[in-house]
Amino acid sequence: MSSPSTQNFPPMGEHAHEPHSPSVSGRLNSLRAGVLGANDGIVSVAGLVMGVAGATTDRQTIFVAGLAGLVAGALSMGTGEYVSVSTQRDTERALIEKETRELAEQPEDELAELAELYRQRGLSGELAHQVAVELTEKDALRAHLDIELGIDPDDLTNPWHAALASMIAFTLGALLPVLTVLLFPPGVRVVVTVAAVAVALACTGLASSHIGGAQPRPAVMRNVLGGLLAMAVTYAIGSLAGAGLS
């Protein structure tokens, strides 16, 4: 019988299903922006072209409305994402500067604070102090940023990545309802557009649930039902407006 020290234990490595690379949060941020951008592009432009299709069957009018919605929405999404992520990045940088200054001016207080944070995580007082001392000797700033603020100084959010991902995804998502409304004849364009948008929203719902590690069914249902409701409301309003103006 082998002793515990000689038994073969699996290596204490990274779990295959858990991302640990330094740039993972940046990639997830871009993925999040991309999925949200595609979803917004599908829903907002689908609602727009459905509303116009409810008011008129003129292909050129629908195309102009869809194109305008696509361009305006893509620029709005990209700008909004850039401003939002830039604000987050500025906040992260300000917190890093603040922590750097505190470590330079109050090293003993910062060491005690770090030890207390690890004690609150469940370590004994002695072990918490030992961990704090060793981490401080290795990289005090990184240790404080990690446990206090959850910030990796080598992996700050990138506003350009998020903005580009959002703009491209919005454009691709918006193209679907625009093309379906334009390519199919008036008799079937509404039904085809609704079906295509429902399938696309189911896909973005699946993608968002996968990124967030959540159950896919609720995400898909929310996406599809929300999109169908938006199209139904705008189509009804467009039909009423078209009837009133005719």
Image (cartoon, rainbow, N blue to C red):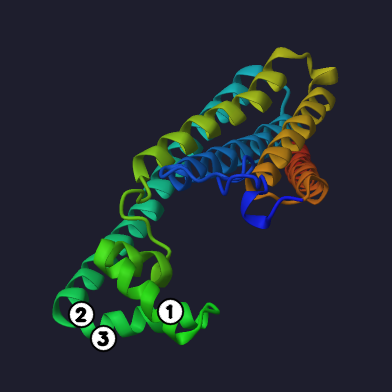
- Labels 3 & 2 near each other (Cβ < 8 A): yes
Instruction: Please provide percent x and percent y for residue 134.
Output: 32, 69
Q: Closer to us: mark 1 or mark 2?
A: 1
Q: CA distance from mark 3 to mark 1?
A: 15 Å
Residue that label 1 marks: 128
Please name whichever residue, 184 or 118, is drawn nearer the observer in this view of the structure.
118
Q: Earlier in the sequence, mark 1 or mark 2?
A: 2
For label 1, count other residues whose C-alpha is less than 10 Å away and answer few (under 14), some (14-19) or many (20+): many
Is the C terminus in the top left, top right, bottom left or bottom right quadrant? Answer: top right
Q: Residue at x 55, y 44 (%)?
A: 19
Disc on the earlier residue, 3 or 1: 3
> Quick check: 91 above or below 75?
below
| Tag 1–tag 2 contact (CB < 8 Å) | no
**Rounded to the nearest whole Å, what is the CA distance between mark 1 and mark 2?**
16 Å
Disc 2 target residue: 107
Secondary structure of the residue carrying tag 2 is: helix
- Quadrant in the rendering for residue 164: top left
Mark 3 sits on what residue?
A: 109
Mark 2, Cα crowd under 10 Å, few <14 / some 14-19 / many 20+, is some
Q: Amino acid at mark 2?
A: Pro
Q: Position of residue 90 (x, y in %)?
A: 29, 59
The image's mark for residue 39 is: none
Against 10, residue 142 (above or below) is below
Q: Dot 3 surroundings within 10 Å: few (below 14), some, or many (20 or more)?
A: few
| Residue sitting nearer the eye, 62 or 216 | 216
Left or right: residue 210 compared with residue 74: right
